Image: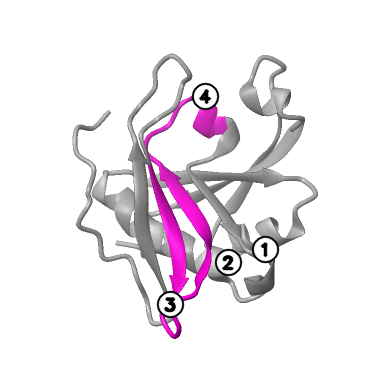
Amino acid sequence: MFEIFYCELELFDDEIYLKLDKVQSENLKKGYVPSYHFKIFRVLDKKELGICDLRIGHNKNTFYGGNIGYFIDEKYRGHNYAGKASLLLFKLALKHNMDYLLVTCSTQNIASIKTIKYIGGEFTDLLYIPCDHEMYKEGIIKVFQYKVNLLRNNFV
């Protein structure tokens, strides 16, 4: 997959910045690709807003679970922080020569659907999670899948 994690990262804009929390190496047994995990902070007052992660590469797990994950604390929702953090993650994905990202969400998660549209995600499919998949065992039966073409959407 790749041998280098980029630890000297400048992932920020005028409103938020991402602080690297940890990296996780590939786990072939579990089907996990390498990943970066960040905390999201507001520039203005350095308040921690939530978390996000980027999973590098594509396999069965990213097909169903996507390349990007995010969570914004409830009191900070409604300001597109998840979308803005995702846009910052695109820079890192491009450093790893990824030309597209898959993003998935629960079919009931209206906020996530709005975030995915905000970042340029194009709907690709309604996926039913296989019963042997970890997500299914957590109670997730189906997800919407979107694709973000990093090269076409002027993120380079």
Asked if the magenta segment contains residue 47, the reply would be yes
Q: Secondary structure at mark 1?
A: helix
Residue farthest toward the bottom in the current orientation of the protein: 44
Q: 112 and 7: which one is in front?
A: 7
Cα separation, mark 3 vs mark 4, equals 37 Å
Above or below, comparing residue 77 to residue 127 in the picture: below
Cα separation, mark 3 vs mark 2, equals 24 Å
Cα separation, mark 2 vs mark 1, equals 6 Å
Tag in front: 3 or 4 = 3
Q: 10 and 47: which one is in front?
A: 47
| Residue 85 seen from this side | yes
Give the mark, 4 or 2, whose residue is nearer the N terminus: 4
Q: Secondary structure at mark 2?
A: helix
Please, what is the three-letter code of the amino acid marked with disc 2? Answer: Tyr
Please, what is the three-letter code of the amino acid marked with disc 3? Answer: Lys
Residue farthest toward the right in the current orientation of the protein: 108
- Dots 4, 2 in contact, CB < 8 A: no
Q: Which mark is residue 46?
A: 3
Query: Would you name the residue on which mark 2 appears?
Result: 118
Give the mark, 3 or 4, whose residue is nearer the N terminus: 3
Query: Would you name the residue on which mark 1 appears?
Result: 114
Please, what is the three-letter code of the amino acid marked with disc 4? Answer: Lys
- Dots 3, 1 in contact, CB < 8 A: no
Q: 47 and 66: which one is in front?
A: 47
Q: Residue at x 23, y 32 (%)?
A: 2
Q: Secondary structure at mark 4?
A: helix
Please, what is the three-letter code of the amino acid marked with disc 1? Answer: Lys
Query: Would you name the residue on which mark 4 appears?
Result: 60
Give the residues drawn in magenta, as a range.
36-63
